[in-house]
Image: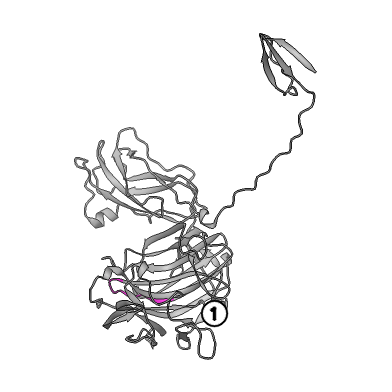
């Protein structure tokens, strides 16, 4: 069928007339047909979400200025994240005078008293908003007076300090809403009555340089899965055991008031040792469980009760990396259950203890994503460190209390195995490495085949 319109005619409105339109002189020729063409929709597969794409860190959103009515002692600062929470975030805080602000925040104890509540924490599943309670206890709350609150984000996309001005102003309103955002408390875990699938007994555990005893039994391996050196990780120590010439008691047993232990000793060597063409002045020590299938897994709970070294430049860790079904090491993935960077000035407290994940294509020796966080923790004495891995989430604990939770970036269907070690940091320079203790004392290590059913809230 052909319909011809004058050039100033109305367009064809029948939606079935969808063929070509061409200009013929002063006329428009519209070729039409009564039925639409056959059409087969193309269905595209959803793009694959790689494990390390499951976790995105949020940005902290905070106001530049918060107003409060004169005389009001308690001031609330609303803070938000720009996205839902995939990983635990902390928000430290402090206060600072403003020149001419009319409020003196005082000395350090006085500044701490400005924040009567624990620091805000976001965990996966929490609401985005938090309110920071500020107690302006020093007086000076007159109209026009002001001071600064300094927010110290940890675990966010940016950890740069954020400054918020608090100013008292006539007519201002500063109150909490009737309905507060929801933030769960920290979890604890309870495995009483649960038999571990594997446990290290300090009195009977065995180790060997290659993880295999003389009778062919799989035991703890007394070196890294890939060898005895890790210089590309900015380490200065040679991982030694009794089979290494020049070693000084790298792995021994002992007992104290806490109980039996295995000692991993890091120290400066009496004389330099040459290994694989390199000269080493420091001894490091390691135990890993890669040859023992009962220690390997993708999910479950791993715990270690240890006393870590306090020596400056010592680098203790309780961590896990990937392996295949034969126990061959693969990196990434990596789960840092505990890592301590003992080259600051704030041992045993301060932000020198960390946990987190390193993710990327399994065994390819490069990573696509890192999500670690340093926390304030008193690590003097014997401390239990633990991590519960589920297909969706990884939890970390210190002495049974949750300190972190993140989306699992490591769940690619493969296994991981635990390791404990004391490295010597490259920050040591040419020092004596002799202050305090360079030893890690291991009282207990265990692995449990459990999931989130062992969790309960502490209320903290």
State the image coordinates of residue 326 (x, y, percent, origin top left): 57, 76
Q: In which quarter of the image is residue 194?
A: bottom right
Which residue is outermost to the bottom? 215
Residue located at (25% from left, 36% from top): 144
Q: Please state which of residues 10 and 60 is positioned toward the viewer in this rendering.
A: 10
Residue 8 vs 201, above or below: the answer is: above
Residue 459 visible at all: no
Residue 297 vs 200, above or below: the answer is: above
State the image coordinates of residue 111 (x, y, percent, origin top left): 26, 53
Q: Does the magenta stretch include residue 306?
A: yes
Mark 1 burial class by Cα count in 10 Å: few <14, some 14-19, many 20+: some
Q: Please state which of residues 21 and 348 is positioned toward the viewer in this rendering.
A: 21
Q: Quadrant of the N terminus?
A: top right
Label 1's element? Answer: loop
Q: Give the range drawn in magenta.
A: 305-313
Q: In which quarter of the image is residue 285?
A: bottom left
Which residue is outermost to the front? 25
Q: In this view, does 236 lie to the left or right of 223?
A: left
Q: In this view, does 394 lie to the left or right of 242?
A: right
By what rule are the colours in the image chosen?
one colour
Residue located at (51% from left, 62% from top): 394
State the image coordinates of residue 426 (x, y, percent, origin top left): 30, 69
State the image coordinates of residue 127 (x, y, percent, origin top left): 49, 48
Residue 310 vs 157, above or below: the answer is: below
């Amino acid at each position: 069928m052909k319909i011809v319109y004058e050039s100033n005619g109305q367009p064809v409105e029948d939606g079935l007339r969808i063929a070509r339109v061409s200009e013929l002189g002063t006329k428009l020729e519209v070729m039409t047909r009564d039925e639409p063409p056959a059409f087969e929709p193309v269905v595209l597969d959803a793009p694959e979400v790689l494990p390390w794409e499951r976790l995105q860190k949020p940005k902290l959103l905070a106001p530049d200025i918060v107003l409060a009515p004169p005389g009001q002692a308690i001031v609330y600062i609303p803070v938000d994240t720009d996205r839902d929470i995939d990983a635990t975030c902390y928000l430290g805080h402090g206060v600072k005078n403003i020149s001419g602000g009319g409020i003196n925040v005082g000395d350090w104890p006085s500044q701490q008293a400005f924040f009567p509540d624990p620091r805000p924490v976001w965990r996966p599943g929490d609401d985005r908003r938090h309110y920071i309670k500020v107690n302006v206890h020093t007086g000076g709350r007159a109209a026009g007076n002001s001071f600064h609150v300094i927010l110290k984000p940890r675990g966010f996309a940016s950890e740069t300090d954020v400054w918020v001005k608090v100013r008292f102003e006539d007519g201002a309103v500063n109150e909490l809403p009737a309905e507060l955002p929801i933030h769960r408390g920290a979890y604890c875990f309870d495995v009483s009555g649960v038999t571990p699938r594997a446990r290290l007994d300090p009195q009977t555990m065995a180790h060997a340089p290659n993880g295999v005893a003389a009778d062919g039994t799989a035991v703890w391996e007394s070196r890294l899965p890939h060898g005895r050196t890790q210089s590309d990780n900015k380490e200065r120590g040679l991982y030694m055991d009794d089979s290494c010439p020049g070693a000084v008691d790298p792995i021994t047993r002992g007992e104290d008031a806490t109980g039996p232990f295995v000692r991993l000793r890091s120290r400066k060597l009496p004389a330099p040792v040459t290994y694989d063409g390199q000269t080493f002045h420091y001894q490091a020590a390691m135990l890993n469980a890669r040859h023992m299938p009962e220690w390997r897994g993708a999910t479950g709970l791993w715990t270690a009760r240890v006393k870590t070294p306090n020596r400056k430049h010592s680098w203790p860790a309780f961590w896990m990396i990937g392996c295949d079904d034969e126990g061959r090491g693969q990196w990434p993935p990596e789960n840092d259950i505990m890592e301590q960077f003992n080259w600051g000035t704030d041992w045993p407290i301060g932000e020198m203890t960390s946990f987190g994940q390193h993710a990327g294509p399994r065994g390819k020796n490069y990573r696509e994503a890192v999500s670690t966080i340093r926390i304030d923790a008193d690590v003097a004495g014997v401390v239990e460190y633990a991590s519960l891995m589920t297909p969706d989430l990884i939890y970390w604990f210190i002495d049974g209390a949750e300190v972190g939770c993140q989306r699992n970036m490591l769940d690619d269907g493969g296994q991981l195995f635990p390791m404990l070690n004391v490295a010597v940091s490259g920050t040591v320079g040419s020092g004596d490495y002799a202050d305090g203790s360079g030893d890690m004392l291991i009282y207990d290590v265990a692995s449990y085949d459990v999931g989130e059913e062992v969790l309960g809230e502490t209320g903290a």
